[in-house]
Amino acid sequence: WDKTANAGFSSARKDKLYIRVDESDDRPDFDSQLHDDDSLLNTVKKLIDIRQSNKALQNCSDIEFISDGYPLVYKRKCAEQTVTVIINPADKPLTVEGVSGKILYKACGEAEINGEKCSVGGCTAVFVEE
């Protein structure tokens, strides 16, 4: 996954590739992703670290959907921890009642806890530890 022909995946001619490779000059590659704190590669690494560091986000925890519509709100729970996840896919900010605690992670926008309310910016996801 680099800047060479076929992104380094194959030395075959372009017309012989099973899956087409992005040909643009600014296509992502490992080296540029590694050195960009906001890259998809580093975002995935951060999410893996958050999941491994928080028992409520691991595979044996319970899940309770608070809202399965808009916005999507659910809680992940285990004996040691509860984490509320809020996903706001719309471009408008919103407020979710009954959420308090510490923000563990936010993606793509702003989020803030005020008492028992969490304000979430448009196109934003947030994880809140209770």
Image (cartoon, helix red, strand yellow):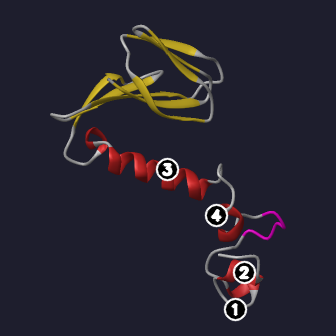
**Which quadrant of the figure contains the N terminus?**
bottom right
Marked residue nearer the N-terminal end (3 or 4):
4
Residues at marks 4 and 2, CA–CA distance in whole angstroms: 19 Å
Give the foreground label among 3 and 1: 3
Q: Are marks 1 and 2 in contact (CB under 8 Å)?
A: yes
Residue sitting farthest toward the left: 79
Horizontal relation, residue 52 to residue 90: left or right: left
Residue appearing at x 74%, y 68% in the figure: 22
Q: As rendered, which of 112 and 21 lies closer to the eye?
A: 112
Horizontal relation, residue 25 to residue 45: left or right: right
Q: Position of residue 104 (x, y in %)?
A: 44, 34
Q: Is residue 2 magenta?
A: no
Q: Which residue is mark 3?
A: 46
Q: Which residue is mark 1?
A: 12
Q: From which residue to which does the magenta span run?
A: 22-26
Decide: few, some or many residues near mark 4? Use Cα within 10 Å; few <14, some 14-19, many ≥20. few
Q: Are marks 3 and 2 in contact (CB under 8 Å)?
A: no
Q: Which residue is mark 4?
A: 34
Q: Which amino acid does the dot numbered 3 rest on? A: Lys
Horizontal relation, residue 56 to residue 25: left or right: left
Residues at marks 3 and 2, CA–CA distance in whole angstroms: 28 Å
Could you say whether the residue bearing mark 2 is in a helix, strand or loop?
Answer: helix
